[in-house]
Amino acid sequence: MSAPARERRRAALLLPSFAGGGAERVGLAIAADLLAKGHAVDLILVERRGELLDHVPSGARVIDLGARRLRSALAPLVSYLRRERPDGLQAFMWPLTIVAVVAHRLARSKARLVLSDHGTLSKEYAGFPMSALLRLSLRGCYPLADARVAVSRGAAADMARLSGLPLETFEVLANPVLLPQEPASDASAERLWQGAAERIVSVGSLSPVKNHALLIRAFARLRERRPAARLVILGEGSERPALEQLVARLGLDGAVLLPGFVPDPAPVLASADLFALSSNSEAAPLVLVEALNAGLRIVSTDCQNGPAEMLAGGRYGLLAPVGDAEALAEAMLAGISAKPQPERQRQRARELAGAESFARYEELMLGPAADDRRTERR
């Protein structure tokens, strides 16, 4: 006798936009998985924009709330919840998570509500008055959700302290990422390096928290001893003008490239020797998993949470203090000189890829599978 068919349910994923960040890519991956399992998926955007719009999986509906400001998203989100009545709603990233809680209450929605944060919030919003608003909103709203998700143990502990909720009320789920089986370079990636003997790559939005200025200053120190090295930073953001000025001031024109956002960084990663992460704060950056999957040697700043966990305290990559250009330069020099161990790195990527997270996200949003519910009723 064949197994009973999975019950089709509607899941709604709420994001600010489809800018090319890690949370947005996680949302797309979850959407694709839910669609493959036969569910209906709505991708709700505060504003319909972003580099990843062309990567929406076939079959998903994109709902544009048309809001220029976050508070303007509340009324159209309430209308959506009343009109479409999804079975589950997952909201990504504070403060949009707060908007989701308020809308859920105003709409008297019966959807299971999941709040998902992808950073270390106390670090990202450290200054007054944002830190006070963060703490008050988490304490008031996060207890009202059905589930709260963090992407690392450290990030979960941070949210527990901020919200006053017990640590065990937070789920820790690795970011699900679909890894290419055999990452391979291509001609366009090779052209970026222009024959450089030592190739260092970084991937991330050009934003203050990523601190690419630190990476460029560290690279300038490294290049005094490794003049053939080249640095490519993939990403786009508000810091571009300042970073371009820094490159020129340090005399690194031609040695440091900022080619912009790339939807699929895998070919560039596959063509590099070393991946470098210079962030002030991270929770569980997807790009570290992708760099490991490319077999790269890795150097990262020792952020409060994610990178140290993901790199097992330095076993899979070297860690340098946050904000220390000299220490980062020394770690990069050691990393570029170390013997590659690609198979070990790829195995670690598979451990971190979060394949089991897909099923757990489905359960959190939509409840147990239909056949599981039938079993429970017997």
Image: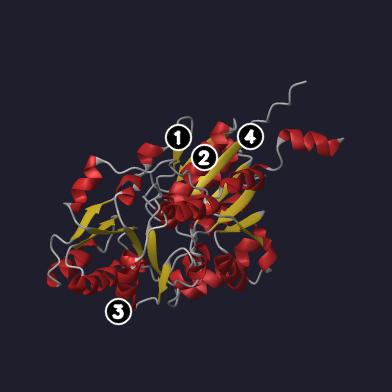
User: Tag 3: residue type?
Assistant: Glu
Residue 330 shown left or right of residue 365 in the figure: left
Along the line of sight, which residue is nearer the eye, 268 or 170?
268
- Which label number is shown at residue 57? 1
- How far, Cα to Cα, is label 4 from label 2? 13 Å
Is residue 340 or residue 17 the one in the foreground?
Answer: 340
Q: Secondary structure at mark 2?
A: helix
Q: Is residue 167 above or below residue 271?
A: below
Distance from label 1 to label 3 (Cα)? 43 Å
Secondary element type, mark 3: helix
Of pointers 4 and 1, the one earlier in the residue sequence: 4
Task: Please provide percent x and percent y for residue 234.
Answer: 29, 54
Q: Which mark is residue 31?
A: 2
Q: Dot 2, crowdedness within 10 Å: few (<14), some or many (≥20)? A: many
> Which of the marked residues, 3 or 2, is nearer the chain's N terminus?
2
Q: Which mark is residue 326?
A: 3
Q: Residues within 10 Å of mark 4 (few under 14, many from 20)?
A: some
Between residue 308 and residue 208, name the one nearer to us.
308
Q: CA distance from mark 3 to mark 2?
A: 42 Å
Q: Nearer the viewer, mark 4 or mark 1?
A: 1
Residue visible at 34% across and 42% down? 184
How many residues crowd around disc 3 within 10 Å: few (fewer than 14), some, or many (20 or more)?
some
Which amino acid type is shown beneath numbered disc 2?
A: Ala
Q: Label 1 vs label 2: CA separation? A: 7 Å
Q: Kindly identify which residue carries mark 4.
A: 9
Question: Compared with residue 192, is residue 156 higher up or lower down, i.e. above or below?
Answer: below
Q: Residue at x 22, y 43 (%)?
A: 188
Disc 4 secondary structure class: loop
- Does the residue at mark 1 contact the one at mark 2 (Cβ under 8 Å)? yes
In the image, is 20 to the left or to the right of 283?
left
